[in-house]
Amino acid sequence: MELILILIHRLIPGARILEASNGREVLDLLKQHRVHLILMDVQMPVMSGIEATMAIRDLESGSGVHIPIVALTAGAHKEERDACLSSGMDEFLPKPVSSRELLEVLMKFLEGFELVDEEVLEFLIRSNEDTTHFNVKDLMERISYNEELMEKVIHSVSFQMSGILDQLASGLEDEGVVKEVSHTIKGLSLNMGFERLAAMAREMENKARGELKVKQLLMESMYAEWLTIRDILSEME
């Protein structure tokens, strides 16, 4: 579920997400909040996703309200899909959920929401699917498998990168700053084997003249990617 949360925040910056650990909590949240879409885990304790969906549809009966409910399940059998749809769910997503499938669901059921331009969304999807966070093998080959040097390089980059990202974030409205700093991040990331971050920096450099909201989405994605890389580097120390 954590990956889905990250993807949603990347696709819809500023989205408010409510989390529930069981079907009963889902019902309690609906009494307190207006919800536009429910991603419902089928297998939950206390009350299953199917039971919760049936209860929601009973509550909605005669009210004119219909909250879209999308099933999330590790099972991909036709019988389970049919059971989900029969309970009142609107769509079915098998786990693990891909970025592309999630995007299609969001655009189908959140039509009234403004999503950032599709070209950038397609890029983020491709970068998730085609690149890695940290190509350790590639870096080790470049430094001739020198572990001491590896440790120094990681320490140096960890110290630099956060500051460079902050510099980019503060200059998103300045085309020259975006081009220059993105180029720096791209080069540093390529040298380190941070494939996904390098791809994002390249896209930011290409979008230097683009809309601010597009650059803000890329910036948020770059920050999130750096946090992931930093966690990986911390585990290596």
Image (cartoon, rainbow, N blue to C red):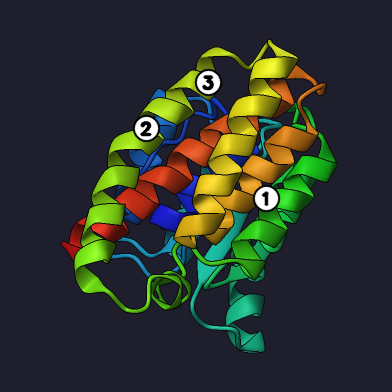
Instruction: Identify the residue position indicated by label 3 in the image.
Output: 169
> From what the image shows, is residue 228 above or below residue 46?
above
Cβ–Cβ under 8 Å for marks 3 and 1: no
- Crowd class of label 1 (few under 14; some 14 to 19; many from 20; radius 10 Å): many
Question: Which residue is nearer to you in this view: 217 or 138?
Answer: 138
91 left or right of 144? right
Q: How far apart are marks 1 and 2 (CA)?
A: 21 Å
Task: Find residue 160 and report its horizontal and vertical position in percent.
Answer: 35, 35
The answer to whether mark 2 and mark 3 are in CB contact below 8 A is no
Please tell me whether mark 2 sits on a helix, a strand or a loop: helix
The front one of 60 and 222 is 222
Res. 7 visible in picture: no
In this picture, residue 161 sits left or right of residue 65: left
What residue sits 32% from the left and 79% below the top? 145
Report the amino acid beneath label 1: Leu
Marks 3 and 1, how far apart at CA: 18 Å
Q: Going 52% across and 13% down the picture, which residue do you hit?
A: 170
Q: The residue under label 3 is which amino acid type?
A: Ala
Q: Give residue 159's position: percent from left, percent from top.
A: 28, 37
Find disc 1 in the rendering and name its residue. Answer: 124
- Horizontal placement of 192 versus 157: left or right? right
The answer to which of 71 and 14 lies nearer the viewer is 14
Instruction: Point out residue 198 in the picture as x, y percentages from the top left corner.
Output: 59, 50
The tag earlier along the polypeptide, 3 or 1, is 1
Residue occupying the point 34% across, 45% down: 157
In which quarter of the view is residue 110 placed? Answer: top right
On the image, numbered disc 2 is attached to which residue? 162
Query: Which of the pair 185/4 is nearer the observer?
Result: 185
Amino acid on which disc 2 is placed: Ser
Dividing the picture into quarters, in which one does residue 97 lie? bottom right
Res 207 label: none
Image side of residue 11 versus residue 164, left or right = right
